[in-house]
């Protein structure tokens, strides 16, 4: 005598969620707001923000400017004269670890920025051009523009 294995009948359980239909106007509104937020985020991180601030000439012909570090660099674009030394003073008030360091890749220099302090770095942009700088995570960016 042979025994046959018979599987129990399949019982379909009710889904754990249910779809609630939304009006078309609400769907269009949510999509439009989402796209507007994406565009705003791209503009914030990748767009140009103003023409920059000209560094003032200090002692012994050194161009100087103080940059506030609070959620970003302010000003984020600094205009200087090429071939003359530049002193950038960073004053950090943002406790975020991301902005605890500033990197100048074209000059192969890095500067640690202690919280609540002003720290300086001196650079010499020898030729005209844009010299980008950024935080240690490359999320917060700025530019030194030599003319």
Image (spheres, rainbow, N blue to C red):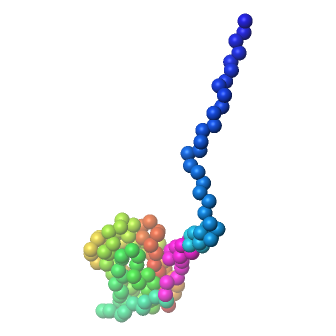
Query: Residue visible at 42% across and 67% down?
Result: 136
- In the picture shown, does residue 23 fall above or below 53? above
Picture coordinates of residue 138 (x, y %)? 47, 68
Whether residue 146 is visible to the viewer of this picture, yes or no, is no
Residue 10 part of the magenta-drawn span: no
- In the picture shown, does residue 63 fall above or below 132? below
Residue 45 part of the magenta-drawn span: yes
The answer to which of 22 and 98 lies nearer the viewer is 22
Query: Residue visible at 46% across and 88% down?
Result: 52
Picture coordinates of residue 133 (x, y %)? 45, 75
Picture coordinates of residue 144 (x, y %)? 46, 83
Would residue 134 be found to the left or right of residue 60 on screen? right
The answer to which of 43 and 130 lies nearer the viewer is 43
The answer to which of 142 and 1 lies nearer the viewer is 1
Prevailing secondary structure of the magenta residues: helix
| Quadrant for the N terminus in the image | top right
Q: Total of numbered circles in the picture?
A: 0
Q: Which residues are magenta?
A: 36-50
Query: Residue visible at 71% across and 15% down?
Result: 4
């Amino acid at each position: 005598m042979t025994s046959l294995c018979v599987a129990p009948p399949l019982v379909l359980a009710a889904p754990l969620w249910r779809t609630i239909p939304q009006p078309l106007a609400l769907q269009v509104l949510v999509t439009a707001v989402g796209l507007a937020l994406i565009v705003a985020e791209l503009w914030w991180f990748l767009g140009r923000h103003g023409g920059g601030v000209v560094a003032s000439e200090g002692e012994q012909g050194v161009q100087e400017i103080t940059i506030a570090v609070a959620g970003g660099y302010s000003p984020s674009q600094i205009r200087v004269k090429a071939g003359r030394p530049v002193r950038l003073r960073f004053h950090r008030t943002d406790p975020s670890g991301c902005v605890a360091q500033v990197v100048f890749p074209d000059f192969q220099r890095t500067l640690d920025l202690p919280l609540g302090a002003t720290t300086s770095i001196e650079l010499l942009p020898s030729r005209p051009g844009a010299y980008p700088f950024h935080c240690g995570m490359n999320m917060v960016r700025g530019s030194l523009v030599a003319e």
